[in-house]
Amino acid sequence: MTKRKNHLKLYVWTGFCPDYTDGLAVAIAKSKEDAEEQILKNRDYIVYAWGTLTVYPLNRRFAVCVSGGG
C-alpha cells in the first residue's frame, strides 16, 4: 500500500491587518495563493497588511494562541 501524500497545509499570518492590536488569519489550503484567496473571500474589506506568514504541514499536532490586548 502506498502512503497517501497530504497536499494541504496550515497557513498562519500573525500581525494581520493590525489596528490597536495585531490580527490573526488562518487558512488550510494547497498553496499560499489558495490560502490568500480563502482569506479574501471571508473578509469584508481590503487586506492592507498581511503580516508574517508561517506555513505548517498537516502531518503533526499543532497549536497557536493569541492573547487579547487593548
Image (cartoon, rainbow, N blue to C red):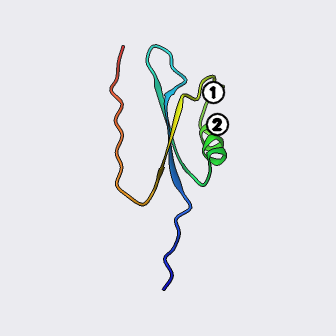
- Please tell me whether mark 1 sits on a helix, a strand or a loop: loop
- Please tell me whether mark 2 sits on a helix, a strand or a loop: helix
Disc 1 target residue: 47
Give the mark nearest the N terminus, 1 or 2. 2
Q: Residue at x 45, y 13 (%)?
A: 20
Image height check: is 3 above or below 64? below
Q: Quadrant of residue 35?
A: top right
As measured in the structure, the alpha-carbon distance from the residue carrying label 1 to the one carrying label 2 is 8 Å
Disc 2 target residue: 40
Q: Quadrant of the C terminus?
A: top left
Residue 64, position in %: x, y? 36, 40
Residue neighbourhood size for the residue with mark 2, other residues' Cα within 10 Å, grouped as few (<14), some (14–19), many (≥20): few
Residue 28, position in %: x, y? 52, 50
Q: Residue at x 62, y 50 (%)?
A: 31
Q: Is residue 27 left or right of residue 61?
A: right
Image height check: is 9 above or below 38? below
Q: Report if the CB atoms under discs 1 and 2 are less than 8 Å apart.
A: yes
Residue 46, position in %: x, y? 66, 25
Q: Nearer the viewer, residue 41 or 27?
A: 27
- Amino acid at dot 2: Leu
Q: Is residue 41 left or right of residue 62?
A: right
- Amino acid at dot 1: Val
